Image: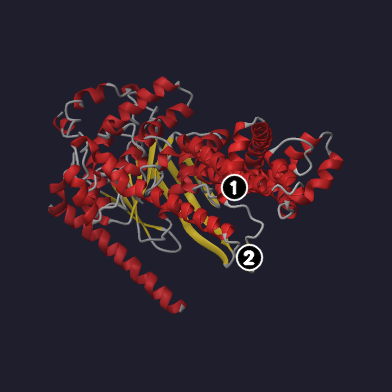
């Protein structure tokens, strides 16, 4: 609406030297993720629970990868180990060759919902990362404004998060994660709590923003449509223990728009994912029945 | 380039409730009573709407509250004048009219204000000490299991001890009368502040801590930007309760005061059998306690302004 006028300016103020995972110099790519032979085991009162088993995954810089699988399959856990929140029990996670030991601003996180600081205004939320990186208050504010116009929420910079709709809150969450110019963006079912119409719009908007940044994205979802629509690659995981069972290239043209959702190529990929997931769900059911 | 002009994010999410459509206030009833709105609409001027709404909502409620107190005063007057005696005896209780004239006499003198000033000073010192120490200990306990395990046994043991029971030890241990009174008042305010702070800190939303860590926040920054603001509603509740308990404890402390203080005034009136003054002292403590508590709440409001518009989950 009011942001269409500011549209051309908003891209001019982005720090383009910090954008894009692929630098013009060869060998200087940022955002290469490597997950090697990772097991993640949680010790609980009732014994050990294997959340992720023998997972290996290589993500190229600038690639948009969806982790797809049924609920509780360990896809969020795998992503949290890339984020640095969950250390692998076995194996190794590296970003650009460096082992991940703790969370850091090079890996921006977008959570499912309610992850904005409710006591900070929208602008203060987005300015938080730059402030922590040590830039001054003024510069942090101007970075925040830049990213808020990028997600179309410049007019709401002084609003508190609890006055915004769920979709708007998630856009602030995306702006906040991007304000650190991360080489990797990790998204944990970010649109899962939104209604269907809002979700589709958020997906389109995310792709438009990503087109500008071209950083590496790992996107966790259980929604097959979402995975096919967004990603370059879909990594399908099985339920307990979480294993990677398929790695599907999505060679759909970009930029993608809603009309793609009904195309034949889209349907074919969706069918492929559906069959895989269905087989997995059946296996899970049978296991449960045997156990019961 | 075409996709870029297309890239403007929509400001509306097609959700029916945009922020501008928020209801103004929860206290305004949506369906006012018919008779009130009819009479009001006839005399209503365009600029008078807020007052009319105020009278119907907040104003009417305050009117009811004042009336509730007036009814009690009238009943008390009747009971005292007629020597009501049925298990509860009003034989020796001065009527509100007598208390009122005694109060006028006190207010025209200087002594009464000195009592109040001394009490205010003691409460202020004790309260500030309790808030500073209470929040520090509370945050330490909420963040560190060690701190909690070391401090909690003391709190569990000492908290149930009433303020009066501290009088002998306070006199024996502390150098001056003033410091003994302040100590007793301080103890009263301390425990609610500590416990509410611990509660607030322990309730910190773990997603927010994870978000802060992924944004590069240090432990100190997380404490300052995430833990403390998140605990603030609970801390403010503790501050308000602490202020109430401070006044509560002050009376016990001022029993040992030789000269001034509203607690001393009340206690002294009892030993001198000055019944109207006892009631004046009691009501003054009640009034000052309520006043100070509401000042604390008002003063803390800016810290909680982010909650104000929160009607939605």
Say few, some or many: other residues with alpha carbon within 10 Å of mark 2 (under 14 / 14 to 19 / 20 or more): few
Task: State the mark number for residue B155.
Answer: none
Say few, some or many: other residues with alpha carbon within 10 Å of mark 1 (under 14 / 14 to 19 / 20 or more): some
Whether residue A88 can be seen here: yes
Q: Residue furthest right?
A: B172
List the residue tagged with mark 2.
Answer: B88
Q: Nearer the viewer, residue B140 or A41?
A: B140
Q: Position of residue A126 (x, y in %)?
A: 38, 33
Q: Verify CB contact (< 8 Å) between mark 2 and mark 1.
A: no
Q: Which chain is disc 2 placed on?
A: B
> Are the residues under marks 2 and 1 on the same chain?
yes
Q: Secondary structure at mark 2?
A: strand
Q: State the residue at coordinates (40%, 52%).
A: B64
Vertical relation: B241 (above or below) B33: above
Q: Position of residue A40 (x, y in %)?
A: 51, 55
List the residue tagged with mark 1.
Answer: B98
Q: State the residue at coordinates (21%, 56%).
A: B34
Q: Position of residue A195 (x, y in %)?
A: 25, 53
Q: Secondary structure at mark 1?
A: helix
């Amino acid at each position: 609406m009011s942001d269409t006028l500011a549209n051309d300016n908003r891209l001019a103020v982005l720090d383009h030297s910090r954008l894009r995972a692929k630098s013009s110099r060869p060998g200087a790519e940022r955002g290469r993720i490597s997950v090697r032979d990772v097991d993640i085991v949680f010790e609980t009162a009732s014994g050990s629970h294997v959340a992720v088993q023998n997972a290996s995954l290589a993500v190229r810089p600038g690639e948009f990868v969806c982790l797809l699988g049924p609920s509780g399959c360990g896809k969020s856990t795998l992503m949290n180990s890339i984020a640095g929140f969950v250390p692998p029990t076995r194996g190794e996670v590296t970003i650009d060759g460096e082992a991940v030991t703790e969370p850091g601003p090079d890996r921006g996180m977008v959570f499912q919902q309610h992850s904005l600081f409710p006591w900070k205004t929208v602008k203060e939320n987005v300015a938080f990362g730059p402030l922590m990186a040590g830039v001054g208050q003024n510069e942090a504010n101007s970075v925040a404004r830049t990213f808020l116009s990028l997600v179309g929420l410049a007019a709401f910079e002084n609003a508190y998060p609890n006055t915004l709709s769920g979709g708007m809150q998630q856009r602030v969450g995306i702006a906040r994660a991007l304000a650190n110019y991360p080489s990797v963006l990790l998204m944990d079912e970010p649109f899962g709590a939104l209604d269907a119409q809002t979700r589709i719009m958020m997906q389109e908007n995310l792709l438009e923003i990503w087109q500008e940044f071209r950083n590496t994205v790992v996107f966790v979802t259980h929604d097959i449509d979402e995975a096919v629509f967004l990603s370059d690659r879909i990594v399908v995981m099985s339920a307990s223990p979480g294993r990677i069972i398929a790695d599907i290239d999505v060679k759909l043209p970009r930029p993608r728009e809603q009309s793609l959702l009904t195309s034949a190529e889209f349907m074919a990929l969706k069918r492929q994912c559906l069959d895989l997931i269905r087989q997995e769900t059946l296996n899970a059911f049978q296991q449960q029945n045997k156990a019961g | 380039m075409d996709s870029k002009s297309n890239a403007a994010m929509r400001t509306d999410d097609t959700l029916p409730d945009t922020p501008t459509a928020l209801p103004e206030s929860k206290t305004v009833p949506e369906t006012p009573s018919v008779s009130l709105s009819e009479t009001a609409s006839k005399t209503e001027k365009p600029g008078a709407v807020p007052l009319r709404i105020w009278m119907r909502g907040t104003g009417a409620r305050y009117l009811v509250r004042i009336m509730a107190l007036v009814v009690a005063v009238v009943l008390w007057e009747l009971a005292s004048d007629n020597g009501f005696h049925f298990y509860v005896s009003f034989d020796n209780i001065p009527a509100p009219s007598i208390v009122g004239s005694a109060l006028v006499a006190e207010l025209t003198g200087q002594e009464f204000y000195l009592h109040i000033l001394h009490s205010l000073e003691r409460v202020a010192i004790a309260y500030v000490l309790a808030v500073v120490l209470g929040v520090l200990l509370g945050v330490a306990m909420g963040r560190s299991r060690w701190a909690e395990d070391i401090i909690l046994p003391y709190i569990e043991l000492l908290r149930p001890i009433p303020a009066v029971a501290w009088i002998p030890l306070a006199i024996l241990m502390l150098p001056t009368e003033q410091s003994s009174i302040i100590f007793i008042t301080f103890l009263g305010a301390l425990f609610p502040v500590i416990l509410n702070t611990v509660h607030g800190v322990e309730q910190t939303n773990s997603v927010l801590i994870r978000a802060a860590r992924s944004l590069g926040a240090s432990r100190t920054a997380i404490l300052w930007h995430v833990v403390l603001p998140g605990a603030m509603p609970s801390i403010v509740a503790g501050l308000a309760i602490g202020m109430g308990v401070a006044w509560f404890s002050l009376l016990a402390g001022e029993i040992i005061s030789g000269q001034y203080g509203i607690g001393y005034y009340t206690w002294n009136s009892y030993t001198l059998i000055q019944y109207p003054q006892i009631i004046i002292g009691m009501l003054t403590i009640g009034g000052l306690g309520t006043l100070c508590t509401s000042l604390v709440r008002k003063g803390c409001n800016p810290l909680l302004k982010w909650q104000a518009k929160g009607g939605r989950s």
